[in-house]
Image (cartoon, helix red, strand yellow):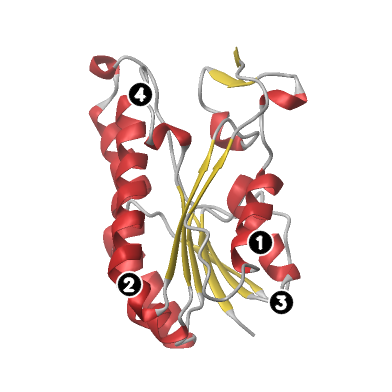
Amino acid sequence: MKTAIVTGASSGIGLAISKMLLDKNYLVYGIARNFSKTHLNHENFIKISCDLTDFNKTLDSIKSIKKNHGQIDLLVNNAGIGHFGLHEELNPKKIKEMCEVNLIAPIIITNLLLRSIKRSQGFIINIASVTAKNVSPMGCAYSATKAGLYHFGKGLFEETRKNGVKVVNICPDMTKTPFFNTLNFKEAEEENSYITPECVAASVAMVLDSREGTVVAEIELRPQINKIMKK
């Protein structure tokens, strides 16, 4: 049985990816702040409660997983948080939180797991964003963190491809998830104005099912129409 670690696994994209991996007979360590609203009980889904802004807790959680299960075949850096608005109006603590969750935590977690993933010749999948590659007014700090994750993934692939590691960036556009619960905008009502967490999970499955020796290094997922709705 292969082993995966998925951050942000309590809802949305991370939960959908976790369910897909369980269907593929993975042992899944799901990391999230709070699983109280996560209705997934499976013997191969191990819930790890951890706030990724807590540096020491993050280190301890990953080291504990490594101690209990030495070989890791897949890391999905999915956890993310977004705060939007005019940059001068953002709370500095919220900017710091975005940097810690969206960029610093995945880089550190990858650092801690990379030797194990090299041994397994496994996968590192970063759930970035279309904003990583586009100008994002009212979201320039968020897009900067996602751009950092995106370029980290591209550089890491060149560094580790000779070791058999597959590093993949997946860049979703507007996705119908709890990500927007605390924001002043959300996906529009039309079904073709957003993608679903299951769409992202399906793209991860495609990556995992690719021919050995062929790496799907990047996927961009876009809804058919570009439309959002203010709350």
Distance Cα–Cα, label 3 vs label 1: 12 Å
Instruction: Give the residue type that dot 2 points to.
Output: Thr
**Residue at x 44% of width, y 45% of height:** 128
Residue 160: which disc?
2
- Circle on res. 205: 1
**Residue occupying the point 30% across, 30% down:** 141
The residue located at (71%, 77%) in the rendering is 25
x, y (%) of residue 204?
61, 58
Among the 4 quarters of the image, the one containing residue 191: top right
Q: Secondary structure at mark 3?
A: loop
**From this viewpoint, is residue 231 visible?**
no
Label 3 with label 1: CB-CB less than 8 Å:
no
Q: Quadrant of the C terminus?
A: top right
Select label 1 or label 2 by which is in front. 2
Disc number placed over residue 168 in the picture, else none: none
Q: Nearer the viewer, residue 154 or 48?
A: 154
Residue hosting label 3: 25
Local secondary structure at mark 4: loop
Q: Earlier in the sequence, mark 4 or mark 2?
A: 4
> Counting other residues with Cα less than 10 Å from the Cα at mark 4, is it few (<14), some (14-19), or many (20 or more)?
few
Of callouts 4 and 3, which one flags the residue occurring earlier in the amino acid sequence? Answer: 3
The foreground one among 167 and 113 is 167
Q: CA distance from mark 2 to mark 3?
A: 26 Å
Question: Which kind of residue does numbered mark 1 sit on?
Answer: Ala
Q: For mark 2, does the 10 Å Cα neighbourhood hold few (<14), some (14 to 19), or many (20 or more) residues?
A: some
- As measured in the structure, the alpha-carbon distance from the residue carrying label 4 to the one carrying label 2 is 29 Å
Q: Nearer the viewer, mark 2 or mark 3?
A: 2
Question: Which of the image's four quarters has the N terminus?
Answer: bottom right
Instruction: Kindly identify the amino acid type of the residue bearing the numbered disc 3.
Output: Asn
The amino acid beneath tag 4 is Val
Element at label 2: helix
The residue pinned by badge 4 equals: 135
